[in-house]
Structures are given as structure tokens and as C-alpha cells.
Image (cartoon, rainbow, N blue to C red):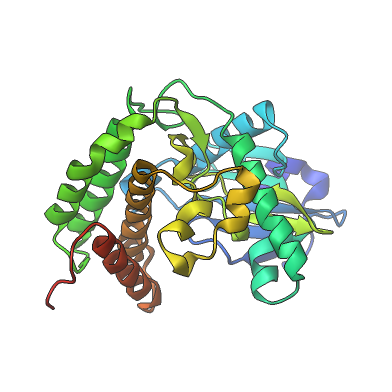
Amino acid sequence: MIERSYGTAQVPQGDDFAEEITHGWFNVVYRIRLRDGQQAVLKIAPPADVAVLTREHEMMRNELAAMSLVRGHTQVPIPRVDHADLSRELVDADYFFMEFVDADNFGVAASRGRLTDEVVVAGGRQLGALNRELNSIVGPHFGPLQGPGSATWRGAFSRVIEDTLTDGERAGVDLGWNYDEIRAILAKNATVLDEVTEPQFVEVDLWTKNSMIKNGRIVAVLDHERAIYGDPLMEAGFTGIDLPAFGDPTDFMQGYGIGELSASQHVRRRLYSLCMVLSMIIETRYRGHQDTATYDFGREQLDLLMSQFGHGPLTR
């Protein structure tokens, strides 16, 4: 794989040239040391026979498309892609090599107290501003970047929710709530989605642990595989509006340039949090988690959202 990407002269000697980077939960990622000492990052998608959520099929190809859009239409810093191989000739999966960014993971560094309060605040505002710039990209349809697309955001988002629920039912995941009750919540509130009439680029997963910081500045945004054309309010940086456990979104919102949401925007935002929490719970079955921490946390957040939609806790 290294030879195909960088040439024979860069193939490392010995067997200690690769170190797994374990922050991600979907693709496998390695930091690679090439023969001349330069570093690169190798990202490999799940093998073709591994079960994933419906919306996660071909996600690496979606990420490459997203990175091309970001690089071509914005000044948002992202790693350079050195080589992508979608042939599945060497391994039964898509993979690509990209530039190694010599900086701290913003979220990790902040959580471990390695950054001052001032840097954390400034970093959050920078992420919000970068997110707004990403949203300036306008697509030809709503939904996945490379399709299938929808003429309306209601149609595209409803499909995301339904695919996720179907994945959960197929795997027998206990949500603590009836699946059709959740479908009814979407049906009851779906008209607010019609307010979104322009398909804007949304990373979906833009939060502190998907960014790199150096000398107090965000120098790279990472992990673009979930990007879609949709409503900017779906971005992860806004999640704390509905779910305090995901952190105070004030800095992000200030950097973005958005203040208090309208009543209908709040409903849309809760629907997006509902989608995220459903995915968090259901994907634990597909990821093969060895403990229930993420599942339990997701269930707690789902209960909170259901109460915001006017549903009391079920008797268990």
C-alpha cells in the first residue's frame, strides 16, 4: 500500500513503522513513518463483509468527495490527500493516505487540561466560524453528497431517520421506546423541516475531537465521512442546545454568528439530536462494543429528548 502511494524508495524497513490512532470509531487509522522519516496517515474503511449502518455504506468515498469540495470551495484547513485507492485490489476495503498534521487534537488536549481557558474559548469560536464557511458550499440536492439525493430536506432527513430505525430493528436493539413512537414524533414535527430550502454542506461531525490545534489556532478539520447537503443546524457543534452533556455550545454559536433560535429552529434542532442519539445507541450493536457505557449514555440522552417532545418515561 505504501509502495503504491509513495513509491518503492519510501517503503519502511523493519516492522515498527505503523502506530494505530484510536480516537475514531468507524475507520481504522494509522500513523505511518516512511523510510525517509516523514510521517503520513493511513485511513482504511471497514472490509466489505463487515455489517455497518445503512447510511455508512461507501462512507470513505463520501469523505473523499467532501474533502475535495472543502478544498475547492473554502479556505477551511484540512489534511492533504496524498493517494486514494478505491480498487480494493490490495485489501478488501477502500483506503487513502493523507498528510500527517503535527498538532494537538483539540478535544483531547482540552479535556486533559493542556490548554488554557482562553485558548479553549477561542478554539470553539474558530470552529463555529469554520463551520459557517463550510456551509457556504451549496449542493445540487439534499442528502448524501454523491446521492441518492432528494428534492426536499424533509424527504432526505426522514430517510436518514427511517434507515437508522430499520437498522436498529434488524439488529434487535432495545431503545427503551417503541420504534413506531419515534416515527410518530418525526411525522408530527416534520413540517418544520420544510423551512430548509437550500441544500448546504454540513459536516455533521464537526466537534473538538475532529479538529487539530496548534499555537492557539485550529490548523485542521478531520473526519468528513458523514458530510451531507442539508440544514446547518444539524452540525454536532449545536448539540449542547438540546443535550447539556455534549457541552456548552456558546463559543461555537458565537463563532458561527447565531444567537437564540426560533421556536421552529428548536424543534428542528431536537430532531437532529434525536437522529444522532438513535445512531449512537444502534451503532453499538454494529461496532461490537465490549461494554455498555456508550449504549447506556445514549439511552439516557434519548429519554431526555423524548421528554422534550412531551413523552414521559416508559414504565420498565
**Which x, y percent locates residue 265?**
39, 43
Nearest the viewer among 173 and 241 is 241
- Relative horizontal placement of residue 4, taking residue 300 as reference (left or right): right
Residue farthest to the right? 36
Whether residue 210 appears in this view of the structure is no
Q: Residue at x 43, y 40 (%)?
A: 58
Nearest the viewer among 38 and 71 is 71
Whether residue 293 appears in this view of the structure is yes
- Relative horizontal placement of residue 155, taking residue 74 as reference (left or right): left
Q: Residue at x 52, y 25 (%)?
A: 138
- How many callouts does the rendering have? 0
Nearest the viewer among 28 and 197 is 197
Q: Is residue 185 above or below residue 87?
A: below
Q: Quadrant of the C terminus?
A: bottom left
**Which x, y percent locates residue 55?**
36, 44
Q: Is residue 195 above or below residue 99?
A: above
Q: Is residue 65 above or below residue 272?
A: above
Which corner quadrant of the image does residue 13 belong to? bottom right
**Which x, y percent locates residue 115?**
75, 70
- Relative horizontal placement of residue 252, taking residue 269 as reference (left or right): right
**Which x, y percent locates residue 139?**
49, 24
Q: Residue at x 60, y 30 (%)?
A: 69
- Relative horizontal placement of residue 28, taking residue 150 as reference (left or right): right
